[in-house]
Amino acid sequence: MSPVSRRAVLAGVAATAATTVAAGSPAAAHASSPAAAHTRKPKPTIVLVHGAFADGAGWSDVITRLTHDGYTVLAPANPLRGVASDAAYIADFLATIEGPIVLVGHSYGGFVITNAATGNPNVKALVYIAAFAPDLDESVGGLTAKFPGSLLDPATSIDFRPWGEGHYDGYVKKDVFRTVFAGDLPRSATDVLWATQRPADAATLQDHSAEPAWKTIPSYFLVAREDNLIPPALQRFMARRAGAHTVEVKASHVALISQPRAVADLIRKASR
């Protein structure tokens, strides 16, 4: 008698008639079969990378939705010191994770994940949320100049504060922060975001990208139609170029905060 048959006999002896009938149904047999359990794909770890002028707290509502669905979600701090060093930091972080990964970037975080995922076979999908998806040798400044519409003018919208020798951090000025960054949030919320913003080294504006991971990894893109930082036309251009599955939402640059359901839905799609 085979092992499967022996288990069936023992179950029939131990169970009531009603339980035996239920267990013998096609649906129950399929759900309990070793083959079905073996082919069930493990949920990937979701890694969320924030951009400049923000931190991991911006992902809070997205994290709540994904963890409720059983995903392991991590939102490491992006150093915001420069493309090469930021990407290396996130790449080292990814190397500590076993199993499949869905890597998500917002804003400048998209620039970082484009470089950090290269060479990591565990990264199964890249998700760009109102983000930069650069090609080889492109920069944040160069990409932004391709299309009109960005209201973040470094000459008038950013306060530069020195740190170390020859380095400057950029902070979005308070009088333009809500308009540029988060026009669909209450002013009380944007006042907090402005006060707690994490600056980026000015070098991130002109640092160039290495070979992009989206050329070999499936990509997904959420376009924020009311983004005043990364023009929607630029977002669409980058999404088409990457061959990304694309959705659009009515949102400011911080779609991860104002449209967490749409963001979580796209991440779920990328994880399947």
Image: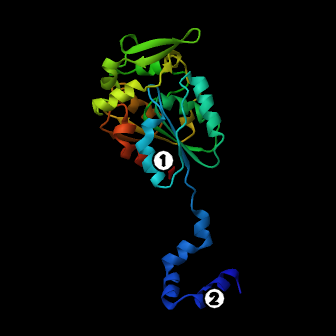
Q: Measuring from the top left, give residue 187's x and y in whole percent.
A: 28, 29
Q: Measuring from the top left, give residue 30's x and y in whole percent.
A: 54, 74
Q: Spatial distance from mark 2 to mark 1, Cα to Cα?
A: 43 Å
* Secondary structure found at label 2: helix
Scheme of image coloration: rainbow
Query: Which residue lies most toward the top here?
Result: 166
Q: Measuring from the top left, give residue 199's x and y in whole percent.
A: 47, 21
Circle 2: is it few (<14), some (14-19), or many (20+) Cα within 10 Å? few
Q: What residue is drawn where x is 41% and y is 21%?
A: 144
Left or right, 147 with reference to 21: left
Left or right, 104 with reference to 226: right
Say which residue label 1 marks.
270
Q: Amino acid at mark 1?
A: Ala
**11 or 272, which lies in front?**
11
Q: Amino acid at mark 2?
A: Val
* Secondary structure found at label 1: helix
**218 or 76, which lies in front?**
76
Residue 111 showing in the rendered view = yes
Left or right, 243 with reference to 117: left
Residue 145 showing in the rendered view = no
Q: What residue is drawn where x is 63% and y is 49%?
A: 99
Say which residue label 2 marks.
9
Q: Nearer the viewer, mark 2 or mark 1?
A: 2
Query: Which comes sooner in the sequence, label 2 or label 1?
Result: 2
Q: Measuring from the top left, give residue 19's x and y in whole percent.
A: 50, 85
**116 or 174, which lies in front?**
174
Work out which quarter of the rendered image holds the N terminus and state it: bottom right
Which of the 4 quarters of the picture holds residue 141? top left
Left or right, 66 with reference to 231: right
Query: Which residue lies most toward the right here?
Result: 1
